[in-house]
Amino acid sequence: MRVVVDLTRCQGHGQCVFAAPGVFAMHGQEALVYDPNPDEAERDRVRRAVAACPVQAIHVGGPATHVANGKATAQDAQGPRWEGRIVIVGASLAGLRAAGVLRREGFTGPLTLIGDESHEPYDRPPLSKQVMAGQVSPEHTLLPRLGELDAEWLLGRRATGLDLPGRQVLLADGRQVGFDRLLIATGVRARPWPKPDEAALDGVFVLRTMEDSARLRQHLAASDGRVLIIGAGFTGSECASVCRELGRTVTVVERGPTPLFGALGGVIGAIAADIQREHGVDLRCGTSVTALEGDSDGRLRSARLSDGSTLEVDTAVVALGGIRNVEWLDGSGLAAGVWGVACDAGCRAVDVNGVVTDDIFVAGDIARFPHAVYGYQFVTLEHWGNAVAQAEVAAHNMLSDQSQRWPHLWLPVFWSSQFGLNIKSVGVPTFADEVVITQGSVADRRFVAAYGYQGRTTAAVTFDQSMWLDFYHRLIEQAAPFPPELATAEGPVELRPVPAEVPDHVAATQNATVVVTGHDPGERRATLVLRHS
């Protein structure tokens, strides 16, 4: 039995914990943890938990397909409109989700999923939580298939090229896989420590894959020294939280001014910093690691920091973000680079000339698309919920003509469980110039912060107040004024916004150059010169 909880919907009511305490548990007041692959003996209790969930966030066998924009699926409307061969590169959450929706919408043609990992798709969020804490095994994170896909699975096969004119995906083993329509969902990989000899030391880890999680968990179980976390984003902060729960001494080194600065800005990041220190984390912001040092046996022993200090450590978790898996698209003619793969709001890929393609689609962490709510800026969203929602839109649009295609207008929702708190955000907090605490108490670590840009509400973050997320979701979609007008006794008497202290925006075309050739309109072409980092 496979269980998936859509934690973007979960509001921490805890009814599932009462119904199936062997599967679900609350970590703190609102942070839900669960076993994604419980014993079959728990089936009846899990079903009761599904029925008891007030927001219907629990799914056995896979998340239920929602109907985008209130419209019926292609199959419900008038049967499938397109047949051919579909290939999905990226056997990921987005890839699996798209495959399931294709079949549910009536696609009966040949379907192939290509993935460079040997496993079937699995859920990544538990890797830095339940798996790292030893509560479940890495193998228990496998995602449920959405019904019988009747698909060809090419797992452990790495895509190395894309021949657009020939409509072929090129694989590392020399095979060429033909397609009529293609979905690119190759996601991201962990950014490694930049010095290969230091990255190879025993005790230095990244955390992205099932194997990464298993190795890190095994190492933590066999050692008892200081754990160094390099980077205080969500993954690094979650790792620090688990290591403190395991009783380990933890130092977090973050070159930015606060933890979570890149996601939530400096004001809320400063609160996150206080929380980490309250839980015994040695947090060092505005600092970087300059070297990792090992002994003669190749085991990690110490780390040198930019402040001149040296730490004795036996474990280092490198949490420096991700690298989008686009190298295999070099020379393909698509607008693909370090920023991801450009596409329109209907998930159709954009070529190097800026022209939308008809038969190449993109979904998940790798997709860079214009978001109407945020000034049509191109964004990439490495969120579980975005991968699911965008895959649904891409799958629907692959089977539809232009008049029946859907836009991907999903409002970003993200969650994190750390230090006993359930942190959730809706919208894009860094698309803001001001932030204000609207409800609750920062001192009690139960509050809501709303973000605004030029007088409009653009995002919100909740700490153990997730029941308010839908309310702010509606404010953002309605372009409500900022500060928001709240008719509640919980809110401050007078809202006092302060500068949001968000990071400067980095140009999307970093490390890329476009060369234009030709003179006549029919001859002018662009060539993308890439330098991967």
Image (cartoon, helix red, strand yellow):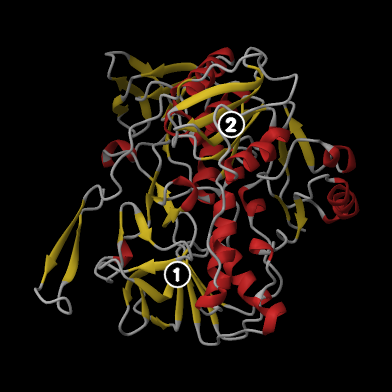
Q: Give the class, few, some or many, for how many residues have Cα within 10 Å of label 2's Cα (few <14, many ≥20).
A: many
**Quadrant of the drawing holding the N terminus:** bottom right
Q: Is 242 left or right of 186, judged from the image as shown?
A: right
Residue at image point 56% right, 38% down = 217
The amino acid marked with disc number 1 is Phe
Q: Give the class, few, some or many, for how many residues have Cα within 10 Å of label 1's Cα (few <14, many ≥20).
A: many
Q: Nearer the viewer, residue 76 or 96?
A: 76
Question: What residue did someone put label 1 on?
Answer: 361
Q: Is 56 left or right of 142, judged from the image as shown?
A: right
- Vertical relation: 365 (above or below) 398: above
Q: Hey, which quadrant is residue 176 in on the image?
A: bottom left
**Element class at badge 1:** strand
Residue 159 locus on image (x, y percent): 38, 69
Residue 158 seen in this snapshot: no
The amino acid marked with disc number 2 is Val
- Distance from Cα at disc 2 to Cα at disc 1: 31 Å
Question: What residue did someone put label 2 on?
Answer: 461
Residue 528 locus on image (x, y percent): 20, 62
Of mark 2 and mark 1, the one earlier in the sequence is 1
Residue at image point 59% right, 65% down = 392
